[in-house]
Amino acid sequence: MSESVRILGVPFSKLTFQETVKLLEHTAQSGGRDKPFHLITANPEIVVRYQEEPKLQEVMHAADLITPDGIGIVLASRWRGEPIAERVTGYELLVELLSIGQRHGWSFYLLGADEETNRIAAEKIAEQYPGVRIVGRHNGFYKLEEEAGIVKEIAAAEPDFLIVAMGAPRAEHWIYKYKSAVRAKVAFGVGGSLDVIAGKVKRAPVIWQKLNLEWLYRLLSQPSRWRRQLALPIFAFRALLECRK
C-alpha cells in the first residue's frame, strides 16, 4: 500500500485524487494480476463498523488501497498531524475513470442497484462515454442461487473495472469473497453512484460539496439516513480520543 495514515486502525492512503487515478490507470493498463486491485473508499461510518466487525477488518486489511471518502477522515488525519490532502470518493473516481476509459477503450461491468437503475445507468454511460465498453451488468437484488452464475459471467467478460454498487460494506465483502474468481483488473464499491448516474438521486450542489457539507445535504434530502449519520459523532469522539493517546 502507498504512504498511509492509520485512523482508528484503518490505513488510509495519502494519495491525492489525481494520484489515485494515475495508480488505477497504470493498474488497468499493466495487467498481469491474478486478482483484481481491490480499492475501498471508506467513510466514517465504515470506520466505526470496522472497529466492531472482525470480518470487515479482515476484508479491509486485504485491500490494496483505502481512500478517504468523507471529510471526517480528512479532518481526523489533520488532528493526528499526518494530513490527507483531500477526499477521494467512489463517485468521483468512477466518473473520472469513465472519462479516461474513452481514450483507452476500457471495459466495465456494473453490478448492483435495482434493475431499472442499473439498466439506465448503463445506457447513460454508453451515451456519455461512447469509447467505454459495458461488457455486462446485473442488478444487486438477485437470489443467492444466482450468485455463482453472476461470478462466472463477470469472469467470462474479463472487465478492466468491476463496479459494485451494493452499498458499504456489502460491496467490500462481495469483492473480497470473489476476487480470486472474477478476473477483473480493478474492483471497487461505489455506493449509490449508479443511482446518481441514472438520475434517480441528485448529488449535492457544488457549493455544498465545496463546503464539505454533502453529508448534510444527503440527510436533508433523505431523512431516512439519520440512523446511518449517528456514526459521525461516534467517529469524531473516537478519533479525537485516539489523537490524545
Image: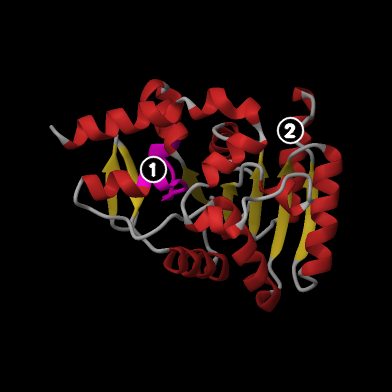
Residue appearing at x 78%, y 50% in the figure: 199
Question: How packed is label 2: few (under 14 Cα within 10 Å), some, or many (20 or more)?
Answer: few
Quadrant containing the N terminus in the rendered view: bottom left
Quadrant containing the C terminus in the rendered view: top left
Q: Which amino acid does label 1 sit on?
A: Gly
Q: Which of 225 and 118 is in front in this view?
A: 225
Residue 79 as seen in the image, left or right of residue 230: left
Q: Which of 14 and 38 is in front in this view?
A: 14
Colouring convention used in this rendered image of the protein? secondary structure
Image quadrant where residue 7 sits? top left
Image quadrant where residue 133 sits? bottom right
The numbered mark at residue 148 is 2
Q: Which of 186 and 34 is in front in this view?
A: 186
Image quadrant where residue 96 sits? bottom right
Precedes in sequence: disc 1 or disc 2: 1
In magenta segment, residue 68: yes
In magenta segment, residue 84: no
Residue 180 as seen in the image, left or right of residue 109: left
Q: What residue type is labelled 2?
A: Ala
The numbered mark at residue 72 is 1
Residue 36 in view (yes/no): no
